Amino acid sequence: MNQAPASTWVLLRGLTREAAHWGEGPNALPDLLRQALPGAAIHRPDLPGNGRLHGLRSPATVQGMVAACRAEMARQGIRPPFHLLAMSLGAMVAAEWAHQAPHEVAGCVLINTSVRPFSPVHHRLRPRNWPTLLRHGLWPATPREREATVLHLTSNLAQQRSEVLDRWVAVRREHPVRSVNALRQLLAAARYRAPRLAPPVALLLLASTHDRLVDSRCSLAMAQAWHCPLQWHPTAGHDLPLDDPAWVVRQVQEWLGSHPRTVGKPETQVSNF
């Protein structure tokens, strides 16, 4: 009989991103998380329309994405409870999952997310980025141009990330996301409205003060509304797991050790390196 893992972690990425965007190798977040949590099982499912599922139709609602993730876990025989670590759109999916099926969720780590009703639209997507995103949505672009734009918007270390850009271009060519699926994912994110009350699970929010895509006040608003701990990274961009995966893992370790039950406990902290 196979021994059950010490804990089971499900990692969910954001808009048009896939499992491969978590990175590979000893310095990427999945491997660092395995090293920090001995015996943990790490799973990186793709949302329909992305990655290995790029041929499927993306759900146009976050609730539909939750249903797809739960069905995929069941199909693979991966049993709850799950710890969900997720960013951006993936964090919306994780939050809704915790609301719909709290018995399946041991805890959530939500990274640089933004949801109604806690934040206005100009905080959820900084207006200065609207022309760039509109231009790339309306005019054809090569895979390298598209991925270079994403990297520039989401990483504050983009100039040092030529190897990341090459990898992302290869990923896009192997698993191209159809425009209709990108729009459906964007629609799902734009119209998702989180419950005003926190889900009855342990929560940790992580945010980048220098996120150039989403205003970090979105995470603060959610932390205040849901009375859950929030840790700030002082230099990283929107893709915090890319810019500083070791910091993310340290926050997870400290949270698991110091805050095994965070529900209903108001706590907003500022963390430096």
Image (cartoon, helix red, strand yellow):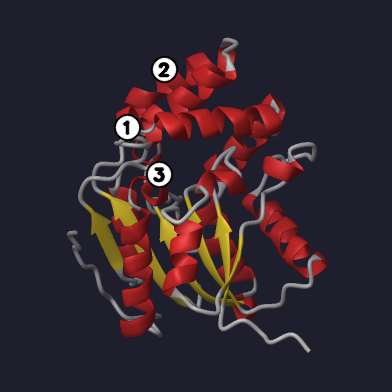
Image coordinates for residue 176, horizontal then vertical, percent: 68, 29
- Quick check: 239 above or below 226? above
Q: Which residue is mark 2?
A: 131
Left or right, 208 with reference to 261:
left
Image coordinates for residue 224, horizontal then vertical, percent: 30, 65
Check the picture and name the quadrant holding the N terminus: bottom right
Does label 2 or label 1 sit earlier along the sequence?
Answer: 2
Left or right, 233 with reference to 93:
left
Left or right, 167 with reference to 159:
right
Q: Are marks 2 and 3 in contact (CB under 8 Å)?
A: no
Identified at 34% across, 59% down, the residue is 246
Q: Which residue is mark 3?
A: 239
Does label 2 or label 3 sit earlier along the sequence?
Answer: 2
Q: Which of pointers 2 and 1 indicates the residue nearer the eye?
A: 1
Q: Are marks 2 and 1 in contact (CB under 8 Å)?
A: no
Q: Residues within 10 Å of mark 3 (few under 14, many from 20)?
A: many
The amino acid beneath tag 3 is: Asp
Q: Is residue 39 visible?
A: yes
What element does badge 3 sit on? loop
Residue ranking furthest to the top: 139
Does label 1 or label 3 sit earlier along the sequence?
Answer: 1
Q: Which residue is mark 1?
A: 160
Q: Residues within 10 Å of mark 1 (few under 14, many from 20)?
A: few
- Quick check: 106 above or below 224? below
